[in-house]
Image (cartoon, helix red, strand yellow):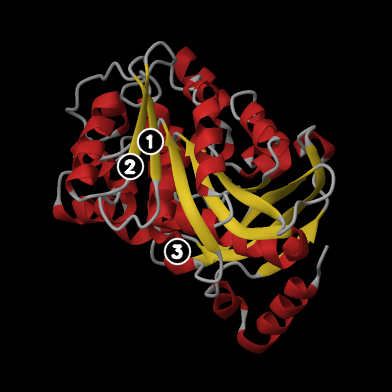
Amino acid sequence: MRVVGAAVAAVLLLLTGAGEASAHPGILLSQEELPPAAVPTQAGDSVRVRYSTLRTATAAGESTGSIFLPRGDPPDGGWPVVSYAHGTVGIADQCAPSVAGFNYVELPAIEQWLAAGYAVVATDYAGIGTAGVNAYLDGPAAAANAVDIVLTAHDVYGDVLSDRWIVTGLSQGGHATYFAAHEAAARAPALDYRGAVAVAAPTHLEQLFPAAGPAIPALPTTGIVNYALLTLAGIDDQRPEVDIRRYLSPKGIKLMELAKVTCSRELGRYLLAHPTSVGDLFAAPLWNEQFRELFREMQQVPVDGFDRPLRVVHSLSDTSVPIPLTWVQLAETQQHGVNVEYQQLVAENHRESLMASMPESLAFAARVLSPR
């Protein structure tokens, strides 16, 4: 394990200040052992890292994350790398996978990637385990978090890692994956980015969130209040200039503050016991140009500019992220000539989509990550 990156970071911090060091992607700022509960059974060596990255789409910051190596000796050329972007777990610090471990939905996928001979790096996302509140569903920031930890991993374990890598994620992580796939080659040009797998990823949210307000009807989509609260919490903390509280009801402010300090499972239980609609959160509508522009900046998934293969997975039975949004996304990317392959599941729900698609995702990875 290398410590050179941390030493370089320390010098930068002394010479230029934390802000300047954070402006450089993937600088290793510190490293420590992972809690035993956060280490997959298939992992050999592992480490928890803190590194420089983006805080929001427009601001530099820091994130933490996990790096896992497979067991045994690396192959010639080193282990290829999978950057895994996790789904919604909450935005409180205790929800970070590098602290709490991966949940039952995502841990089996991490285990399979490791067992197949891939090193896995997994960002917590800036603000989950680091200062402030996570800018939830801020695609450019999450993308940078997922790309920059690959750079950090090569600082720590570069002698046993290949430069070849892909990015993948579920749900919130699938949203991040689209953005990371768009930026990966340019953001980490010294590495050999090969492709992406976005599973059950929300798209076109920038067209939905500005419609929020007290008059919005109750929606049958499960979890929408949870997602809305996490998004509002991130905006409240990271973009105070928009004064999001001015648009919220007293109940909305109370629940937003609760979302900042609880994990998604606990928040979901609270909302089940205290039924709430999206309209209950607002005192005024968000339908104005300020918020339309903000949500475009944060959430508008690219439909062109993907320079490596892109794999998309979604299920007809997904009630958390409706599949028509992905159909629109696919049509738009195909119109722009993007190399995209699509797997449509039938019976699996939102969470089940990840493992149901793993055999095909592993085959995709083997194909795109093969030495040229």
Q: Counting residues from the N terminus, which is met first, the one under dot 1 or under dot 3?
A: 3
Q: Nearer the viewer, residue 235 or 49?
A: 49
Q: Which mark is residue 185?
A: 3
Image quarter where the C terminus lies is: bottom right
Identify the image quadrant of residue 211. top left
Q: Foreground mark, 1 or 2? A: 2
| Residue under the point 70% across and 38% down | 114
Measured Cα–Cα span from mark 1 to mark 3: 19 Å
Q: Which residue is mark 1?
A: 312
Look at the numbered discs 1 and 2 and tell me whether their residues touch, using CB distance below 8 Å.
yes
Q: Which residue is mark 2?
A: 340
| Residue under the point 70% across and 32% down | 111
Q: Is residue 13 above or below residue 353?
A: below
Secondary structure at badge 3 equals helix
Secondary structure at badge 1 equals strand
Secondary structure at badge 2 equals strand
Locate residue 232, reporting x and y percent.
38, 43
